[in-house]
Image (spheres, rainbow, N blue to C red):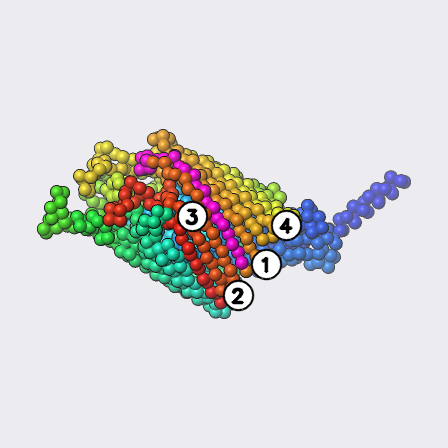
Amino acid sequence: MKFILSAVLYTFSFMTLLAQTKSIEVKDAQTQETLTGVYAINQNNKKDYRLTENNLLKLDLGEVYLISHIGYSPLLLKIETTTPAIITLEALETKLGEVLVTGRIFQDPVMNTITPDLTERVTQPKNVADLFRDINGFGLIKRGNYAIDPSFRAAQYEQLNIQYDGGTKVMHACPNRMDPITTHVMPEDISKIEVVRGPYTMRYGATFGGLINMVSKRPEVGNYGLSGSASTGYETNGNSLVNMVRLQYAEEKFDVVGMYGYRDFGNYDDGAGREIPSSFRSIDYSLRMGYNFTSLERLQLHWRQSFGRDVLHASLPMDSDFDDSSMLSLDYFKKRPGKTLQNIKAKAYYSYVDHLMSNSRRSNFAVAEAVAPVEATTAGGRFELEWKLDEFWTLFTGTDALLISRDGQRNRLVKQNMMGMPLDPPLAFTDKIWQDSFINNYGFFAESRYRLNSSTVLNAGVRYDLVNSDIQDPEADFQAYYPGLGNRTEHNFSATASLKKLLDPNNQLEFAFGRGVRSANMIERFINHFQVGQDSFEYIGNPNLDAEVNNQFEVAYTGKKILDGAINRLDWGASVYFSHFENYIVAIIDSTKTRKFMPAQEPQNPKVFRNLEDAYKTGFEANLSVAFLDNFQLDAETAYVYARNEDLSESLPLTPPLRTRLSLQYNKDKFWAATDVRLVSRQDELATSFGENQATPGYELIDFRLGYELFPGLDLGAAVLNAFDQQYYDHLNFAFRNQADAGLSGLERLTDPGQNFTVFVKYAF
Ligand SMILES: [Cu+2]
């Protein structure tokens, strides 16, 4: 009897316990899609957190929970019997075609790094360099103050898949890379940069060393009517000036944004007070129009032009007289919540770069005039379908294209003979640079995301690229090197698999493997006796190069902790990777060939691009951020990479040294101030075959920045950069070239700007 009674009591209490929980389904307020991976954190007992199971949150009656999902505004909810069974969360930002990383942990690509909003807290006239220099793992390959390429983990140029707004590309026309993709954009227009740190997604084009997406600023959802901003920036070092105006009009159905920017940069002084030829002027404008058929369907047209004038390149043999680029892109997306075919995305773009360089400002102009008009056309697009195969399984299928073609020559007028005697009349020559070449890449991909359980997501993808290339107007000597020259087709296969595991709401672990394949670029295939490197060698392309392969493995851990005491919050993360390369492409001296132009000069033997048998790289990045005493924040981050060319027993070229950045910030009401310290170590891991003959000394830099909101909409920023006027240069800087007039020796690396006082004013309405 007693046993039965207790059994009844037990059952009764168990049932009451059951009755005390309530099941709640959480949906996206806009699309009404059921959200999974939603957290509910009990506000009385923070250790008690719940995750959605079978689409439902099971929460205790009478308790207060913070319902949160990354990428959505959290909601505080008291659970009562009257609480509705379905609640909705507002997305912080609607999912857009141009954004890869949305902040939704289970939907974002693995191993991603994103910047904060780059249009805020501006203290100086920016150039492209400033967009990348604060992202951990990045370095800058400088040939002056204009032609700057980002380098990430010792990967650069086409090894990085650099694009705008989720896929638009603009390829450079210049064989010396005077006009990399980053110069065809207004830095003030870029709101953030997203990075996937390896070949871990197959959806955005062939990716070898990493994917970089520069996202331009677009109208905020709900900010209707006319708005805009005007800004101006000035810096003392170089008397550089930037002016920019942005106007936008938006309503629910329609939005339009127009931008105009003017930049006039002077020659800067390095830390030793030497004037470095680096001035340039540019005008940019863009127009973007969007039409929303519904809140789930959008069409967008983007037109942009950029005009560079009189660009001086301290570390290249010529200067650009002009560099004009035009870009048109068309984007479309349609979301179909609740349907199996959940999303349709399409993009098409076309860009054209018209570039003229000459040596008219250089000392060797008196001996031989050289004028090189070159042009590049890039066209492409992508089409992607997103399938929701079941609640936990999403499949992306799609195709993309990247078609690059270039042409142009160098016109030489030789005015003196080898003895220095004047030639009358001068001798005219034409050297074919691009030889009317093209590389067309057609990609097909499938990528699948599968939620194994409430805290684990598995991502796997495959990609096939068909690469068709040809050189249609080869120079006779190039034809003689490669008698079989002609149309070539390559077939490349890439793949990735990764696992993301949420240990608890604050800690996340990621594992990823990726195989990324990159076919040789046009310089590596077809350049014919041109000085396109950091050294004074002539380079010869190799149309028979095999595609290079990166097999990369990476583990990353990120965490955060919110505290009550003097320390308010901690954030930390670390990532370790290893890459094994197959057929890595480098240029190596070929003693069977001899120099073509200025044959009396050294070095006599040119370099020819080849595949390496064996190469690898390994490294890590780590960061720690401490928010304390309510108004302070201390950030520390460090990155290191070790790269090895086993064939030549040396480092791979352009491998940056250990870099560390410390930043202390104070932030109160309308005022903020920051001190940034950069510590860059000595680099003695050199690629001597690339022209890296001497170890690069380390350097330390200190910047002070501050900002104040004078009244709503009007922001002031000011900074002292390189406060102690250090003379320094980075390991990735090119050496001075053809600068005898400026008294700068080619044996010396380009030195960076010395002390610089800057101001920036922005008014937004
Ligand atoms: Cu050029």
Do the numbered discs 3 and 1 sit on residues whose CB atoms are within 8 Å?
Answer: no
What SS does tag 1 mark?
Answer: loop
Left or right: where does residue 410 sit relative to residue 87? Answer: left
Quote the CA–CA distance across marks 3 and 1.
48 Å
Determine the CA span between mark 1 and mark 2.
Answer: 26 Å
Q: Earlier in the sequence, mark 2 or mark 4?
A: 4
Between 648 and 292, the residue placed more toward the observer is 648
- Residue found 71% across the figure and 50% down from its top: 44
Task: Assess disc 3: are there few (<14), some (14-19) or many (≥20) residues with their C-alpha within 10 Å of its C-alpha.
Answer: some
Distance between mark 2 and mark 4 Cα atoms: 36 Å
Amino acid carrying label 4: it is Tyr
Amino acid marked by disc 2: Pro
Camera-near label (2 vs 4) is: 2
* Comparing labels 3 and 1, the label whose residue is closer to the camera: 3
Residue 376 in view, yes or no: no
Beta carbon of the mark 2 residue lies under 8 A of ligand 1: no
Which residue is disc 2 drawn over? 712
Which is nearer the eye, 728 or 486?
728
Give the magenta part as a residue range: 671-693
Dot 1 corresponds to which residue? 90
Report the front residue among 543 and 126: 126
The label nearer to you, 1 versus 2, is 2
Residue on which the image places disc 4: 39
